[in-house]
Amino acid sequence: MKRIIVETEDGSKTIHIEDLNETYHSIHGAVQEAFHVFINNGLYFFYNIKKPIKILEIGLGTGLNSFISLLESEKKQLKINYVGVEKYPISAQEFENINYFDDVFKFYPEFENRRSEFYEYYQKMFTSEWENEEEISPYFTLKKLEKDFFELRDYTVNEFDLVYFDAFGSQVQPDLWEEELLTIVANLTKDSSVITTYAAKGTFKRGMKANGFRIEKRPGPPGKREMMVAFKNFSYE
């Protein structure tokens, strides 16, 4: 499938798959979508938890969500063990052309005197070996899995506190939003956990409810009216 780099409305870039007419991130702004969906409506709920948390990302893609999570881990001094799953990793050329570092780092002026250090972290996240857990920073470890999402049925159950569900949209890959995969993902979460996604899909809502999650619809990122967060035995109030 042919992939091209395109610019989104907030100036950051993403990948567009021409054959599917699908982008890795919102054309209305890749970076602002990542902050809104996965940080403000996901990681945010764990800021006051004084123990390491484990995050699973369904759709590692360009690494944008993981890099922002690393910066947040340093900012909040929250230890994060991060597992990102991606069947079709981006190339070194694509990573270089997208280059989210400046787009994201400008939101963390408190780290300006550590800019070179964080740039090394950013590069290390891409160059780290697949299938191996690596310490990227004192607060962040990363394990990248080159797998089909459905292969996660063989992964350790009850392991993750938080899931970033960032699969391609249901219009191009509807099976990723049906109960089979949602049950696989739900089985990987701890008894108290959160799953956040950019979508407001009825099949996602029903699949999560069938697996014991409570669903909240929330305002979506720019260009999208709604999104969803699923909570299992988890209270943020």
Image (cartoon, rainbow, N blue to C red):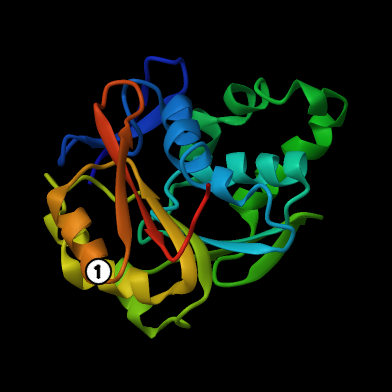
Residue 19 in sight in this render: yes
27 left or right of 77 in image: left
- Residue 159's spot in the image, x, y percent? 52, 75
Furthest residue toward right: 113
How crowded is the residue under tag 1: few (<14 C-alpha within 10 Å), some, or many (20+)?
some
**SS type, badge 1:** helix
The quarter of the picture where residue 207 lies is bottom left
Residue at x 36% of width, y 27% of height: 221
205 sits left or right of 65 in the view = left
Q: Is residue 165 visible?
A: no
Q: Is residue 116 above or below residue 7?
A: below
The mark total stands at 1
Q: Position of residue 32 (x, y in %)?
A: 46, 25
Q: Residue at x 41, y 30 (%)?
A: 33
The image shows residue 57 at horizontal and vertical percentages of 45, 56
Residue type highlighted by circle 1: Leu
Q: Residue 179: percent from the left, percent from the top?
A: 18, 68
**Going 36% across and 56% down the picture, which residue do you hit?**
88
Give above or below for 51 relative to 30. Answer: below
Single out the residue that lies furthest toward the front.
237
Residue under circle 1?
Answer: 181
**Residue 161 placement, left or right of 173:** right
Within the image, what quadrant is residue 227 found in? top left
User: For residue 119, which quarter of the picture?
Assistant: top right
Residue positioned 60% across, 39% down in the render: 68
The one of 202 and 61 positioned closer to us in this rendering = 202
| Foreground pick, 171 / 209 | 209
